[in-house]
Image (spheres, rainbow, N blue to C red):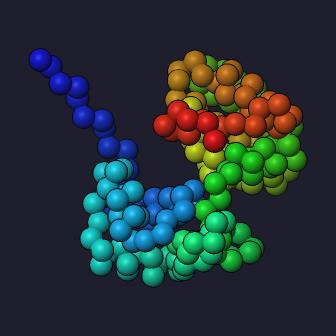
């Protein structure tokens, strides 16, 4: 019997990568304890001791705040001007829909690439919303001043990705698929 080859690791085992993954998890998941966070990291192949995790949370400025259901959850300071720590935003797709409806001017695709146009100065804002939406079919974004380049995971996935983003911007497609393939 032949076993499948292990998946190639795509994230380095560094402090910066670990802390970014912690921030991503806290931004999408209501994490109530360090034990829960350590398990979420372990599920992604990141083994961390409780002492290291505690140190990371302290360095990142993480605090416990009231979540949407009233329980205490970990949160890290937000990006941008308002750095107030907020509980997990479980509706990153609604943020993407709002941003896309405000700034997406056009979307054109070729093979696995999509070029998005925005008004001047808005490309990084849209790219950030796409990055936080964690779409399963999106490998990454590169933003300039008024242009965002998207790279689809599927070698021929650009046209479908462009069509879906246009639908999200128009309000006819509210759902982004997560890496696990489940809509949110």
Horizontally, residue 117 falls left or right of residue 78, namely right
Residue 38 placement: quadrant: bottom left
- 2 sits left or right of 108 in the view: left
| Residue nearest the observer in this picture, 28 or 21 | 28
Count of number-bearing discs: 0
Q: Estimate the x, y position of residue 136 in percent, counting from the top left.
A: 54, 36
The quadrant the C terminus occupies is top right
Relative to 127, residue 66 above or below: below
User: Where residue 167 sits: x, y (%)?
Assistant: 80, 30
Counting from the top left corner in percent of width and height, residue 174 is at 75, 37
Residue at 64% over, 54% down: 90
Q: Is residue 61 at all visible to an observer of this figure?
A: yes
Q: Give the answer, above or below, for where 44 lies relative to 63.
A: above
Q: Is residue 133 above or below residue 73?
A: above
Q: Nearer the viewer, residue 145 or 111?
A: 111
Within the image, what quadrant is residue 176 found in?
top right
Q: Nearer the viewer, residue 180 or 66?
A: 66
Q: Quadrant of residue 33?
A: bottom left
Which residue is at a point 46% across and 63% down the rendered structure image?
22
Residue 8 placement, left or right of 116: left
Image quarter where the N terminus lies is top left
Image coordinates for residue 141, horizontal then vertical, percent = 61, 43
- Check the image and report above or below for 81 versus 92: below
Report if residue 118 is visible in the image.
Answer: no
Task: Name the residue located 39 percent from the left edge and 56 percent from the top edge.
Answer: 40
**Residue at left offset 50%, top offset 58%:** 25
């Amino acid at each position: 019997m032949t076993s499948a080859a292990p998946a190639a690791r795509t994230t380095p085992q560094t402090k910066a990568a670990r802390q970014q993954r912690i921030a991503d998890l806290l931004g999408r998941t209501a994490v109530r304890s360090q034990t829960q966070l350590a398990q979420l990291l372990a599920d992604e192949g990141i083994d961390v001791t409780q002492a290291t995790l505690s140190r990371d949370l302290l360095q990142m400025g993480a605090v416990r705040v009231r979540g949407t259901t009233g329980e205490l959850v970990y949160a890290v300071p937000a990006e941008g001007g308002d750095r107030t720590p907020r509980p997990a935003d479980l509706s990153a797709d609604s943020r993407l829909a709002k941003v896309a409806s405000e700034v997406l001017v056009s979307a054109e695709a070729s093979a696995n690439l999509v070029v998005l146009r925005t008004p001047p100065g808005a490309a990084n804002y849209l790219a950030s919303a796409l990055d936080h939406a964690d779409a399963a079919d999106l490998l990454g974004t590169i933003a300039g001043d008024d242009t965002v380049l998207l790279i689809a995971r599927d070698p021929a996935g650009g046209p479908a990705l462009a069509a879906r983003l246009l639908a999200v911007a128009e309000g006819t497609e509210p759902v982004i698929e997560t890496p696990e393939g489940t809509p949110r």
